[in-house]
Image (tube, helix red, strand yellow):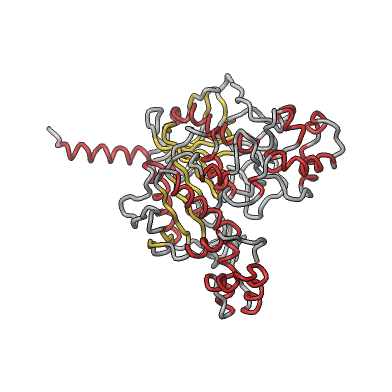
Amino acid sequence: MQIGMQAVCALAVAGLVLGLSAPAHADSLTVATEQGKVQGKAINNGKVKAFLGLPYAAPPVGDLRWKAPRPPVRWKAKRDATRFGAHCAQGRVFDDMVFQDGAASEDCLFLNVYAPANTTGKSRLPVMFWIHGGGYSGGASSEPRHNGDFLPLKGVVLVTINYRLGVFGFLATSDLAKEAHGEAGNYGLFDMVAALGWVKNNIGSFGGNPANVTIFGESAGSFAVSTLMASPAARGLFHKAIGESGSALGSGPDNQTVAEREQADNKWVDSLGVKSLEELRALPTEKILETARTKRGGFNPVVDGKVVVEPVAETYAAGKQAHVPLLAGWNRDEAGLGAGTTVEEWKARAKDLFKDRAEEFLKLYPGETDQQAARSAADYNGDAFIVFGTWKWVEAHRKTGESAVYRYRFELPALPSKYHPGTAVFHSDDIEYVFGTLDTRPGATIRSEDRKMSEQMMSYWTNFAKTGDPNGPGLPVWPKYGKTNELIHLDSTITSGPDAFRPRYLFLLKGMPGPRF
């Protein structure tokens, strides 16, 4: 019996869909990497294959503490890849960060790969490379909200990584700079580049396409995405970028040079009573973490001449960043709500901060009633915290990046949960929607609109990873961020239109005092 071409195509599509959701077979859970074979496991009722705790670099311990990552060691026997590797040693852990691995360790340079069940080395699916947030001081790839049970069902291979944090990821002293010929301080960023290199060399064996990699991250992860786009060291290792709430195009500590940071970091090392790098590297992990908690200013990326060759904003201004499609945005209440702010307090604070510009400021952030003042306080706090810097990134890339840009504002209010009071669209609120992991949020009751929003965001994000365009069948149209400044509003009813708040950001370009209020 002959089958028409239309029927053949329909059968092929049906077979692909079934292939992405069919249970994984035992033989497909063994994959050969450049370091050796790994044995993964099936998750989500066999619909997804997970390969956990894969080392992408040598353990950065002993003499390798505060050095750029070295290649991972090889192994002969099949490696168990059914459990997460240790999360990176960290001092401050945010309340809503929960880890599924064991105790923290400096031996933490692991990544995880999730793929649809029936992928093979010939599948060539788009790759999504996740960089977790946490202020460059906390977090890990093993947080339940980053689980890969669901996103791969949209036809992608997902990679989530650990990278060195805080003092272990970003210490920059005179001795370290001398040892590394002037380069010091960005070990956490070097880790990300090394992990991308591992993906380039190995992801094809898991069914991923090394020529179609999207880096994406939230908060510090989004800062990292904007930085990697500007970094020559990462050039060619990714092809699209997604940033959720954050960028390095502000005026914060990320723009310090190693020389500018050395004095503060040298002073901190002196407080430890050590006389050499050898003695410093011999100190116990907990001793370093305990002392690091008291260092003013913490530890952040620096302009080191290798990963970050100049202030990131300068790279974008010159059009020297990676010219790749960008999808970026933020949440409505990044710094929480401004409850309790009165009209009198708001106007006095405006005058205190903006002086002769206070009248113009109050037109953009009005406060004629206590309710209005509270809303404006929330808006300005969020803008000062993270929105303005993200907006500057989007604007800069639209101007010089020669690539499509898509912008969003996440606006669906959250229900109360264990760590958040509800009603606010808080910083990091979007993560579980992007990963389809709403049920991992402790104490929250998930609504039908949450499920719908998660499904839509997963589709937008994975469509973008596939083609550089988030649009697709069944989704409200997401316009490009072009001359009319259009963005999409991700709410219970998705809408799009010109940016109504653009005058605020243009005002802040004239000068924004700190701190927020």
**In percent of the image, x 38 and y 55: which residue is there?**
483
Examine the rendered structure and indicate whether residue 381 appears above or below residue 441.
below
Residue in front for this viewpoint, 244 or 314: 314
Examine the rendered structure and indicate whether residue 470 appears above or below residue 39.
below
Residue in front for this viewpoint, 463 or 438: 463
- Which quarter of the figure is the C terminus placed in? bottom right
Residue reaching furthest to the left? 1
Residue reaching furthest to the top? 76
Residue 288's spot in the image, x, y percent? 78, 40
- Which quarter of the figure is the N terminus placed in? top left
Q: Quadrant of residue 224?
A: top right
Residue reaching furthest to the front? 356
Residue 59's spot in the image, x, y percent? 66, 29
Q: Quadrant of residue 131?
A: top right
Quick check: 204 left or right of 311? left
Quick check: 91 left or right of 226? right
Q: How many marks?
A: 0
**In percent of the image, x 57 and y 76: which residue is there?**
367
Residue 27's spot in the image, x, y percent? 44, 27
Examine the rendered structure and indicate whether residue 505 appears above or below residue 291.
below
Residue in front for this viewpoint, 40 or 492: 492
Residue 213's spot in the image, x, y percent? 45, 37
Residue in front for this viewpoint, 366 or 61: 366
Q: Quadrant of residue 60?
A: top right
Quick check: 331 left or right of 452? right
